[in-house]
Image (cartoon, rainbow, N blue to C red):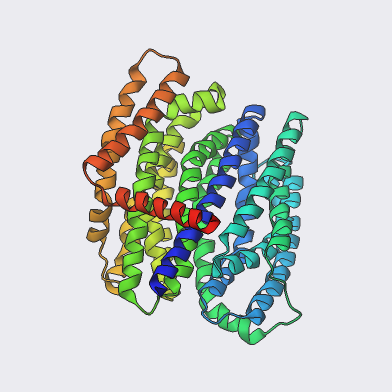
Amino acid sequence: MQNQNIKSTVLSSLFWKLMERGGTQGIQFIVQIVLARLLMPEQFGTIAIVMVFINLTQVFVQSGFNTALIQKKDADEVDFSSIFYLSVGISGILYILMYISAPFIASFYNDTILIPVLRVLSLTLFAGAFNSIQNAFVSRNLLFKKLFRSSLGAILISGTLGIIAAYQGLGIWALVIQQLINQVSITIIMWFTVKWRPKLVFSLFKVKKLFSFGWKLLASSLLNVLYMNLRTLIIGRVFTPATLGFYNRGKQFPQLIVTNIDGSIQAVMLPTLSAHQDNSKRVKEMMRRAIVSSSFLIFPMMIGMAVVAEPLVKIVLTDKWLPAVPFLQIYCISYSLQPIHTANLQAINAMGRSDIFLRLEIIKKTYGLIILAISMNFGVFAIAFGSILTGVISSFINAYPNKKLLNYSYKEQWLDIMPSLLISLIMGVIVYLFNFLSFPAWQILILQIVSGSIIYILLAKIFKIESFTYLVGTVKKLINSRKEASV
């Protein structure tokens, strides 16, 4: 009965996390489409440079300690309040540094608009400090329904104001408004929906204890964010802002889907796996289920998006964004490996082995930088292709420790996801042939999406793919449980 209750809680949490991700990312997708139609590629390129520095500073506020609070079995009010005050203090220091550094960053990129934009967007650090503790409380208590409501409300408010600003001709400031209002709104809404409040307590001992686990994740996150955004920094410096805009827009489409699906599974995985960290067999079972299920969903979407890239960009973003098509296709391949990365790394964290996590990040970033240094000499497309090569190698590296920790080898993992990959490839080949039809782009796109979905589901049923049966059964259970609860 207890296992059944745990499973029900996990499934319910995953449902609301998917709803939160799907709802906010779906609206964000629509907002970005409207803004892309109203604004120019170079304006998106400029904001992309700014967001690199914002994301780097947010790591110090939102990473490491946040995960440590979730992972710690006996975290209490003193833990939460101590980390909150520490995060706010760090935010203040970082904001001053960003304010002072803005002119130097603008000079390096030869773009003076970076100064005010960077100084204004750096204000999100303070909202991020508060929000990181709220998110830790939500994740620890699996209160993802509340997160869904706050995230959805925030994106509706910020998206609406951003679009209005773009219509009023505010240019890049429409993007600044949308980003800033989103962070502030979600923090305010969660203040009223999540019943956590900081207490007037601070324990240096508690901070040190959490730091012993969290600093490794903080260092890992910093390395990861710096590395993931290094391509943006290089492209923004070496090439034009418009080229960076095309690159980022092409990357954004597959990133949106993977963040929605894989990110939802990741958010639920860590607290769930951490609760069973003393039972390696159970952790392996849950990790395997996460890999198989997320791969079944992500593979067809990535392969499908790659083959419909051109009509998709034409219809959604207009012809001015067509140079983004090859970047979109490249990153569809790169992001398709994300389920393997996520499941392996979350299992390592759940087992309390942040030391292994940090070592893996150092190894991956070392050869990743070598690949980047070589590829940048051959142009922007070589830089993008380098992400695929790095991803393939990283899938081996991330899986290696779990052969010993959980007795779950890399070969086993690929055997688990291979059925989904094969039927996705078959579907992709068939759908790609529709590109040769002499129909308008919108008709081809609709035909490809509808036929691709039908083909994939039929292949899953014909070959009795395990993931398909499991997911259908899970959805039915969720629907039935919600019906019973409403009676």
Residue 391 visible? The answer is no
Report the residue at 58% width, 34% height from top.
Answer: 240
Asked whether, in this view, residue 241 is left or right of residue 101, the answer is left
**Frontmost residue, 264 versus 51:** 264
Which quarter of the figure is the N terminus placed in? bottom left
In percent of width and height, residue 137 lies at 61, 69
In percent of width and height, residue 420 lies at 28, 46
Q: Is residue 367 above or below residue 87?
A: above
Find residue 59 and report its image quarter: bottom right
Seen as rendered, the residue at the extreme bottom is: 205
In percent of width and height, residue 9 lies at 48, 65
**Frontmost residue, 18 versus 418:** 18
Seen as rendered, the residue at the extreme top is: 438
Asked whether, in this view, residue 349 is left or right of residue 194, the answer is left
Report the residue at 57% width, 79% height from top.
Answer: 210
**Frontmost residue, 277 versus 396:** 277
In percent of width and height, residue 375 lies at 40, 44
